[in-house]
Image (tube, rainbow, N blue to C red):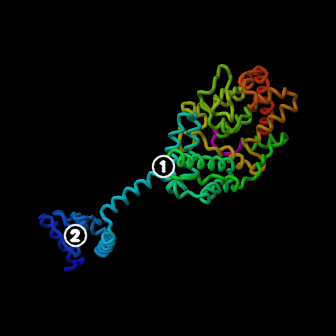
Amino acid sequence: MKLKDLIIKSEIKQAKQSGGQIKKLFDGNGLFLLISPVGGASWKYAYRFNGKSKTLTLGKYPLIPLIQARQKHFEARQMLANGIDPAAAKQEAKVQIKQAACNTFEHIAREWHEVELPRWQASHAEKVLKSLEEDTFPYIGDMPITKITPEIIIETVKRVQERGAYDTASRVFQRIDRVLEYAVVIKKLISSNAAYGVRRYIATPATVHLPAIPQKDLPEFFRRLHHEPTRPETKIALLLLILTFTRVGSLRAAEWAEFDFPAQEWRIPKDKMKGRRVEHIVPLSDWALELLTELQTISGKGRYLFPGRNSTNQPMSANALLNLMHKLGYKDIATPHGFRSLATDVLNEHDFNSIWIERQMAHLNKDKVQDAYLHSDFLPHRRRMMQWYSDWIRERYQQGLEG
């Protein structure tokens, strides 16, 4: 006799009340509901394959209602009619699902990252993983590596470009390319790299360097900075960037361990310098030291001079200083990077030796031997130059506070 929902519910209720024996309710053609002594119930299909008795579990009741159990039963019988063991097919499907979960882009990317770790600097490895987690995994992380197409890669990169981060977009593409290459060569999960030849079809606008704030406008800039209601450490960060004219990335990732106060030097490790082969020495002026002393009362017990808002184990956001410039009214007028141009212009106009300026800018020298030798050369000259520039900037700063 065919089962009905009322009969099933009644039998399960009785099983719960009596706590008796295991009971089977048959629906026909090998389909039955197995009821445990405590009222739990599972759909089963009893059949024979190659002369052996077998049982296939179709799911738990009531999660799988009667009508759905009959549909699953029908599909299993069709497999059997086609010479397929439904239990073996179910097990194979589970294996494939498990393999698919291990072959997603995120899983392969994290594995690639682990393989590359021994040859990377720790700071670089951290940047690569953070980039993947922020700009790649949210969009294609759950996608099987076999489903990544050129169109998907282009769309992923465009998402980053749309926020104006073209350099970041280029690095995102490069990392997708490396992960897919790893999937081809090492994992042998795919036969070809979908990123091959894609770069030429990713639009990259010409780089436009926004000008620095004109020298005559510096007092007004400092007046706005002084009155801007923002975190004091962010203001200090911007002032130190102006005084040291280092790259933004080096400043925001600066660690207290890099500063030698008795020597009045900031020694930036080579792995934090763009393409450098040696550390970069930044002489610290008296004003820079004053700012650092003030900053120590805020973040001196941590690792970073400028820890992030959400975690002291991470440096400040890459856009923190840019956002501050926007608040000050300089959006589309000037950027933090522009203060390097300002320093170059001012120092050249006041006849400082161009070699000293180039060394302090940490511009690369094509001669590797000379580059390694000169990293500390001209240091006494550069120290005097940095103090002069600090005094020159401070004069404009005072003008802004008095204006």
Most foreground residue, 133 or 106: 106
Image disc number at residue 317: none
Question: Which residue appears at 20% of the width and 76% of the height?
Answer: 7
Label 2 Cα crowd, 10 Å radius (few <14 / some 14-19 / many 20+): many
For residue 126, above or below residue 17: above
Q: Is residue 227 magenta?
A: yes
* Label whose residue precedes the other's in the sequence (1 or 2): 2
Say which quarter of the image contains residue 367: top right
The residue carrying mark 1 is 107
**Could you tell me the amino acid type at mark 1?**
His
Residue 141 horizontal/vertical position (percent):
52, 53
Picture coordinates of residue 258, whole percent (x, y): 62, 27
Task: Find the magenta span and give its range.
Answer: 226-233
* Residue toward you, 356 or 51: 51
Residue position marked by numbered label 2 in the rendering: 33
Report if residue 248 lies within the magenta region. no
**Residue 226 seen anywhere in this rendered image of the structure:** yes
Using residue 248 as the reference point, say whether residue 1 is left or right of it: left
* Quarter of the image where the C terminus is located: top right
Residue 77 place in picture, x, y as percent: 30, 72
Q: Please name the residue shown 12% across and 66% down the image.
A: 18
For the residue carrying disc 1, how many other residues have a C-alpha within 10 Å: few (<14), some (14-19), or many (20+)? some
* Element marked by disc 1: helix
Residue 312 can be seen, yes or no: no
Q: Quadrant of residue 320?
A: top right
Q: Position of residue 266 (x, y in %)?
A: 67, 27
Amino acid carrying mark 2 in the image: Leu
Q: Quadrant of the N terminus?
A: bottom left
Q: Is residue 154 left or right of residue 285?
A: left
